[in-house]
Amino acid sequence: MDTKFSTAIHALILIAGAEEPMTSEQIAMSVGTNATYIRKVTALLRRQGIIRSRQGVKGFELLVKPEELSLLTIYRAVEETERVHCFDLHQNPNDECIVGRYIQPVLTDVFREIEEKAERELGGRTLADCMGRMRAQFAAGDKR
Amino acid sequence: MDTKFSTAIHALILIAGAEEPMTSEQIAMSVGTNATYIRKVTALLRRQGIIRSRQGVKGFELLVKPEELSLLTIYRAVEETERVHCFDLHQNPNDECIVGRYIQPVLTDVFREIEEKAERELGGRTLADCMGRMRAQFAAGDKR
């Protein structure tokens, strides 16, 4: 399980909605993990200029408007890769066999085409979309 | 790394192209793994009626035409799930916090929408497509 991406979205929704800068401890409490893991994720978000922490102030602030912050930008920041990864490829095919020799380039291409669609989908959704869905869930939950 | 899917495609290309039934040992040699792992993957393919082994004959035969065998069918058989999985979700958000309470349904929906696109893409590609690409790579490789 690699939950850096979902943890980052959770943390960013908290940071976007908070009136005061959110600390790692506060974020960890809501995410249900420890502050060390949150600091690892926030360091990656900070490195990409998505959040900042100001000197003398405890906690993080959002530097990008939620409606301008795509899920693809968040994914790339915390997974430290440009490319969305969905499918693993076996690494030691035997290149003395024709299938073994060409399976990697063929599957790399096929998987990449599908992962590019996933990238486009992530690129078309923003933090603000997630916050809107959350408000809708909240409103629906309240009516039950 | 979960390479059951790419291993299964590799194995099925071998089985589809072989004149005699392919054994686990032959497949393992080309994939670059051990026969035990191949038997695990082929057992899953056999369970879904994609390949068979006949009594008294060593090795596997394809039961579905390559042009009718989608990558989605292969994925579902070996991953033992209907749903393509691309993104993990953190499992212990704190439901005393509003964001913690609604993050799972929100991200489950968002991730599912993207994974459904990936499913559609896998569903639109067949084993025969992979074999055609492999022939093209082989022809291009020969010219180099």
Image (cartoon, coloured by chain):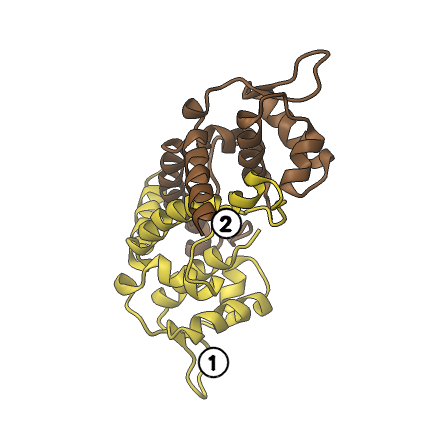
Chain colours: A yellow, B brown
Question: In the figure, B51 relative to A82: above or below?
Answer: above
Report in which chain the residue with disc 2 lies. Answer: B
Specify few, some or many for label 2: CA neighbours under 10 Å numbering under 14, 14-19, or 20 or more. some
User: Label 2's element?
Assistant: loop
In the rendered image, the residue lying farthest to the left is A67
x and y percentages locating residue B35 in the rendered image? 72, 34
Specify few, some or many for label 1: CA neighbours under 10 Å numbering under 14, 14-19, or 20 or more. few
Residue beneath label 2, please?
B89
Front of the two marks 2 and 1 = 2
* Residue A58 numbered mark, or none: 1
What residue appears at the point 31 percent right and 52 percent down from the top-left corner?
A120
What residue appears at the point 54 percent right and 71 percent down from the top-left corner?
A39
Residue B106 visible to the viewer:
no
Residue A76 visible to the viewer:
yes
Question: In the figure, B121 relative to A37: above or below?
Answer: above
Question: In the figure, B122 relative to A90: above or below?
Answer: above
The residue type indicated by label 2 comes to Leu
The residue type indicated by label 1 comes to Lys
**Same chain letter for marks 2 and 1:** no
x and y percentages locating residue A79 in the rendered image? 48, 62
Between A81 and A53, which is closer to the camera in this rendering? A81
Between A61 and A70, which is closer to the camera in this rendering? A70
Between A109 and A99, which is closer to the camera in this rendering? A99
User: Label 1's element?
Assistant: loop
Q: Find residue B60 and report its image quarter.
A: top right
